Image: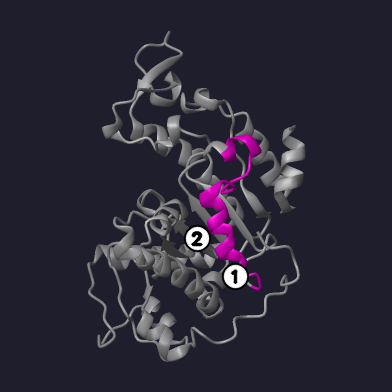
Amino acid sequence: MKIENILQRNFTRISDKYRKFALAKDKCRQCSIYNEYKQVGQSEGNALDPTFFFYGEALGKDEVEQVRPFIGLAGQRFRAELRKHKHVFTKKNTIISNLLSCRPKNNKFPRPSDGHEYFMPANLLKSKDPYAPYVVSNALSVVKNCMSHWVGKEIKLLRPKIIIALGATALDYMMDEGGITANRGKWVFLNQWRAWGFATFHPSYVLRCERRNDSHVVQQFEDDIKKLANSWHFVVTNDKRLKLSDDEWKKQAALDNFTKKKKLSITSSSSSKSNWSKLIDSYGGLAMASFDTKKADQVITDEFLKKYTKLDAKPYDDPFAEEPPF
């Protein structure tokens, strides 16, 4: 299928900038991962102004054949969960993507321990050999190069309000958080992207757990998506940081960097509160649940959500409720 037809099929909304981005991505041959199956993947959904940005690890066999993300068995499990909340997640307010744009060999995500050699253009790695078109690279460099060129640029271009990591690898690479079990189902503000972050298990893991009758993980996955669907509107609409202009955000970020350098410890009982704290307090009585001076991520706890929202209440009435779900 021609790339223009793929873009027309995959996206309900698409900007001219994103179209150019997708066309450039389709021509990417920057590492040897492409050589395994010779297909660059594309995202799917709203490529103009999405609210939700879901991302996993990489393409699988079905994704390569159809040039669509999350379309295999695990993808169908994921989409089925989204359809339970079709009044929230639709193709007109959501986009789904992956860390890697190509399918790695045998679906094995590149890791330093896999013993596999990867190749990248010498100019990207600043090789000392001017005559070597390609040089051997490690797994970490390959993944980070792909991320910086594609999914990282994609997020900056689309500026979603909520970024959702599917699985431990997605969480670790994009949000610098280790351990999906410990970090799943939590709201955390990501200064790097000026967006709220959320994480849950990868659908392939959920599918494996279903097959071995591990209902605990399956229930947690379903609870996470339900929590995301029922609390996102409160989280987003009450965060004034998302409404700041770019210049205002830069000033606020500079203020935060100054705070971090001073290594100030900020708590809800502190006599001197930063603008961040005052900002959060103005949302309706929220004292700082936690303030990480290293990452400056504001965490919204379940206790707070239970106090100020009803997780089982009727979710926000999305204007695209009648649009086709995933």
Q: Which residues are magenta?
A: 62-87
**Residue 162, image x, y percentages:** 52, 64
261 to 38, vertically: above or below:
below
Decide whether residue 72 is among the magenta residues: yes
Comparing marks 2 and 1, which lies closer to the viewer?
1
Identify the element where label 2 is drawn: strand
Q: Which quadrant is home to the N terminus?
A: top right
Specify few, some or many for label 1: CA neighbours under 10 Å numbering under 14, 14-19, or 20 or more.
some
Query: Residue beneath label 1, please?
Result: 84
Identify the element where label 1 is drawn: loop
In the image, taking residue 48 as reference, residue 111 lies left or right, namely left
Disc 2 or 1, which lies upstream in sequence? 1
Decide whether residue 308 is among the magenta residues: no
The residue type indicated by label 2 comes to: Ile
93 to 8, vertically: above or below:
below
Quadrant assignment, res 210: bottom left
**Residue 193, image x, y percentages:** 48, 58
Counting labels gives 2
The residue type indicated by label 1 comes to: Lys
Does residue 322 show up?
A: yes
**In the drawing, what numbered circle is on residue 169?**
none
Q: Residue placed at 67% from the left, 80% from the top?
A: 317
In the image, taking residue 65 as reference, residue 238 lies left or right, namely left
Query: Residue beneath label 2, please?
Result: 163
**Residue 159, image x, y percentages:** 57, 58
Specify few, some or many for label 2: CA neighbours under 10 Å numbering under 14, 14-19, or 20 or more.
many
